[in-house]
Image (cartoon, grey):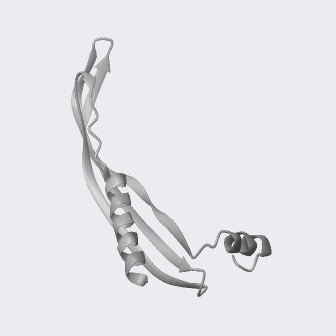
């Protein structure tokens, strides 16, 4: 990336020291239950899982090298009971994964220098 002159100039102008590349996904896993809805409302119960896996790669532009990787994962179960109206109770797995990777990045970058 630094071999492209406009990119290298912009990073130099910004005095950028690190670039952190995040990659990963949150996927819906197994589910169970059933729900029926009509003009009078809904009735039933459903449940499903979510798994979140994310990785951050840290590059140091001063040394022009990859200096580390951190990763995190989180899983949770979401529920949706319905008596007249469905009420989703969603597991905050993406938020938990983001908090986890943020904490790890803070620790990594704080301990570097």
Q: Nearer the viewer, residue 95 or 91?
A: 95
Residue 63 placement (x, y as % from top left) = 59, 87
Residue lying at the far right of the rendered structure = 5
Work out whether residue 44 or residue 18 is closer to the camera in this orientation and state it: 18
**Residue 16 visible from this viewpoint:** yes
Image position, residue 81 (x, y; %): 21, 31
In terms of image quadrants, where is residue 36? top left
Please identify the residue farthest to the top as the structure is shown.
40
Name the residue located 76 percent from the left edge and 75 percent from the top edge: 4
Residue 32 coordinates in the image, percent (x, y):
24, 43
User: In the rendered image, is residue 32 in sight?
Assistant: no
Judge from the rendering whether residue 18 lies leftward or rightward of residue 69; answer left or right. Answer: right
The residue closer to the viewer here, 106 or 1, is 106
Give left or right: position of 22 versus 94.
right
Q: Picture quarter containing residue 99?
A: bottom left
Residue at point 39% right, 54% down?
27
Q: Is residue 11 above or below residue 35?
A: below
Q: Nearer the viewer, residue 107 or 14?
A: 14
Say which quadrant the C terminus sits in.
Answer: bottom left
Q: Is residue 14 left or right of residue 69?
A: right
For the N terminus, the quadrant is bottom right
* Quadrant in the picture for residue 105: bottom left
Tell me if residue 51 comes above or below residue 35 in the rendering.
below
Q: How many marks?
A: 0
Relative image position of residue 29 (x, y in whole percent)? 33, 52
């Amino acid at each position: 990336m630094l071999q492209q002159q406009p990119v290298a100039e912009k990073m130099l102008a910004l005095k950028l020291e690190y670039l952190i590349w995040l990659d990963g996904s949150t996927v819906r896993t197994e589910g169970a239950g059933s729900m029926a809805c009509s003009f009078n409302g809904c009735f039933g119960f459903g449940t499903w899982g979510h798994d979140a896996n994310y990785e951050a790669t840290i590059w140091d532009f001063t040394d022009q090298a990859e200096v580390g990787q951190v990763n995190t994962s989180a899983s949770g179960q979401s529920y949706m009971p319905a008596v007249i109206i469905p009420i989703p109770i969603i597991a905050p797995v993406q938020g938990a994964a983001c908090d986890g990777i943020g904490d790890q990045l803070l620790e990594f970058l704080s301990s570097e220098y």
